[in-house]
Amino acid sequence: MNLIATQIERFGGINLLPVLLAVVALVLIGVPSTWLTLTVAGLAMGMMIFLMASGLSLVFGLMDVLNFGHSAFISFGAFIAASVLAALGSWVGADNILLNIAALFAAISAATLFGLVAGWFFERVIIKPVYRDHLRQILITMGALIVAEQIILAIWGGSPISVPRPNFLSGSIILGDVSIEIYRLFAFGLGLVVFLGLYAVLNRTRIGLLVRAGVENREMVEALGFRIDRLFIGVFMLGSALAAMGGAMWAGYETLITAAIGSEMMIIVFIVIIIGGLGSIEGTLLGALMVGLMGNYVAFLAPKMALASNMLLMMAILLWRPYGLRPAVK
Amino acid sequence: MSKTLLKLDSVCTDIAQYHILHGVSLEIPEGGVHVLLGRNGAGKTSTLRTIMGLWQARDGSIRFRGEEISREHTSDIARRGIAYVPENMGIFGGLTVEENMRLATHKGQFDRQRLSRVHAQFPAMEKFWTKQAWSLSGGQKQMLAIARAMIEKRDLILIDEPTKGLAPAIILSMVDAFREIAQETTILLVEQNFLFAKSLGQTVAVIDDGRIVHTGTMAALAQDSDLQTRLLSLSLDSHQ
Amino acid sequence: MGELKNTAASSSARVVRLFVYGLIGLIGIGLFLAPMLFPDIRSQEVAARICIFIVLVASYDLLIGYTGIVSFAHTMFFGIGAYGTAIALKQMGPGWDAILVGGSAGLAVSFVLAALVGLLSLRVKAIFFAMVTLAAASVMAVMASQFSDFTGGEDGIIYKTPRLFSSATKLLTDENGKVLRIFGVKANGKTAAYYFVFFGSLVLYFVMLRIVASPLGTVLKAIRENEMRAEALGYKVVLYRTAIFCIAAVIAACAGILRAIWLKYTGPETTLSFAIMIDILLMVVIGGMGTLYGAIIGATLMSLGQFYLKDLMQAASEATAGLPLIPDLLDPDRWLLWLGLVFVLLVYFFPAGIVGTLTRKEANA
């Protein structure tokens, strides 16, 4: 028994959970080509959710701040990207791949840039006055979320907005009898790049070292002579920017967005960081992939249970590990 | 009489609605080991945390080399050359021993000479250099905490109950380490273990109920068994 | 001199206190006499809504104000109570037995669910709990709209209530066989339904006052003030928190039953939606956390405010019609924007709310 446990640990321990999930799904679905399509969709969705969730997790880890307004960045990212893509309509639809890429790049950068700036504003105005008061933090960030959602409604209106997809990302690749949407591959790739980048910064740079140490013990980092609050605003801005980027990607994935996009995604994001454990991006990635896969498999097997299945997954994991799969060491 | 390094003057600290320190006055001369004794809850840890700026003093002044630091941010106080080893040691368990040490350097670079001195003092640190700190034993964690305070020259090290829960053999090796550190640095040591404190301390202050109730040399206290009984049985009584 | 100032301060405090209690008394009398004072249908709807929301908000305050835990699942329990009653009334026909069966089923489900969520996630940080309840509530809302065979989906369920509450029912008749009017109030089923809601709410409110004054209330306050100390004193913090969470859930479900009976309709918009959760939050913060009287003032002000703010915004929007964006921001549909701003400012500057702020001044004097 112990032998099996060490073997599992050697091959990655809890990191194998998504793989396990995929194997179980393969048995239940039974058709390999369908399964592969769903798996790719799940991984792509997982990576986009990772973008949205990673910042929230780090922000919480570093300053014990949980921002219920986080989803406002997701919504704004989605709507700004949609507006930029619509404004660059001729580039988006052009047969020239360079123009396509330029339009996509402009949309994602605009969203991300907005996230950076709005994150700075949000941290200074909304979060800073309530650093150490959880109750008021939850209430105020929730209030800010309401206001932000209403602003989106005032600017973009209540009816759904369609998001044009750049030409080179639409369509699918056909491998035998498996069809894989190109956009999903792109979303997966972008998420992976961001994860690797974050991982490298956290593990190879001095700032990353300070962030990791700060997540564990903020006071001690200050007692060693470093200002956590200055570090924190940087992390907060980065997290907001990533959320906006995730929102932009999600807009392109859904192709039709409403003002509710943020609050819909927020539930998923919460489930992900609870599953993954707060404060670590590895945990967030693990949680995001599991939720993405679970959502897609169940949507195929029992469509009505898609969201509930993730809820049940969260409950099960909380029972097993009350602090999530891979929380930061505290 | 040597120069005063740190001077607390009627420092009061509150935590939420509770008054913790009611006017602590204390003078730490430059050089040597100075001990702050007292029972649980007397305000020893609170005194160190207030010096470090982790808790804000409501009233009173804290001067380090004659400059007021009681309103400064913790990180600025640290940059003045004050190191803090809390009771829980403040080790970053998810970081390697090396990363823990590297954080204690202000520029992220090790001074090779000092590093080899630390390694000589605590061979375990070299052995587990790339291991994550949570895997260390309790004694090794305490060594790492002290090694962090030695890796660059500090003017003052505040250490909170370093012997708590440690085996006698390890405590002995720590006496050596502290003597070594005291060659170049002043140490303010909070202790409950009187034997350990006696073997290191030059001066001693006793705190009770948020006030300093006795100050003097360690030698005088060590000889005066009446005084010991009075001050230390006071602490025994209040344990019951 | 100092004494003089003191007397002045305490007499002004007395005025403030009189004002608060006077206001509460006025609201109480107003609600009691609502069918006589405001006989039009619209006003009666508002009055019934206020009664039900006072209970809902007060039960939420048991959590957020008295215990310091933030839950976003309160509408879930509200909805379970309402849906239980609604489904039973629809399936079994309009009878008291249906209300009894459906209502108790709703209460039981609320209780079990609350116990599960509480034991599972009250062990860890408050912030975890907020996230778990938010997730649970939205999953429940989605499920309610998806299992439409049972719940009517987005359209909700329309049903009949017992004959006693039907508008056509004549409780008392005069010699001509017409509905008797007492002080101008028609003694018909609608009035009976209103008083059912009113007295139901009143009983629930007194139950909560009792809970707050009980030893349980004292322990909860101790936990809120200093969790570690309460734990050290031997109180099982998780159990106490779970207990109050279950109590609050059951009371919210009771409020849901009242709402289902009053409206004769139950749907996501009237019970489960997140908009209602936001209403509850606003009411509890406006009235004041940690004081059950706050619930009365918060629920009343918000309900009236929602009613009139929209009219005001309509006028302002029309007045600024020529300007860019401003009319959009002033559109009556955007009233939540302004309430949200008010909410944020309140939490910043008056975290104690109206009742809390006024009575604290009194304590200072």
Image (cartoon, helix red, strand yellow):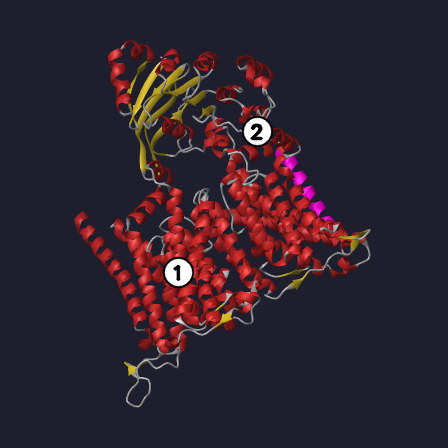
Mark 2 Cα-neighbour bin, 10 Å: few <14, some 14–19, many ≥20: many
Q: Mark on residue B95?
A: 2
Figure check: C83 above or below C345 = below
Give residue C37's position: percent from left, percent from top.
Answer: 32, 76
**Numbered disc 1: what chain?**
C
Is residue A233 in sight in this rendering? no
Q: Which residues are magenta?
A: A185-202
Relative placement, left or right, of A176 versus C153 is right
Q: Secondary structure at mark 1?
A: helix
Q: Which mark is residue C14?
A: none
Magenta span includes C361: no
Residues indicated by labels 2 and 1 sit on the same polypeptide chain: no
Q: Chain of mark 2?
A: B
Q: Is residue C172 left or right of residue B144?
A: left
Q: Are the residues flagged by discs 2 and 1 in contact, CB closer than 8 Å?
A: no
Mark 2 falls on what kind of element?
loop
Q: Residue at x 44, y 66 (%)?
A: C85
Residue C283: horizontal and vertical position, in percent? Answer: 40, 60
Query: Of helix, strand and loop, which mostly describes the magenta segment?
Result: helix
Identified at 24% across, 61% down, the residue is: C18
Amino acid, disc 2: Leu
Numbered badge on residue C56? 1
**Few, some or many residues within 10 Å of mark 1 (<14, 14–19, 20+):** many
For the residue pair C157 and A170, the one nearer the viewer reads as: C157
Residue A157: give x, y in percent of width and height: 59, 65
Based on the picture, tell me whether residue A200 belongs to the magenta stretch: yes
Find residue C167 and report its horizontal and vertical position in percent: 39, 79
In this rendering, does residue A313 appear at all?
yes
Amino acid type of disc 1?
Answer: Leu
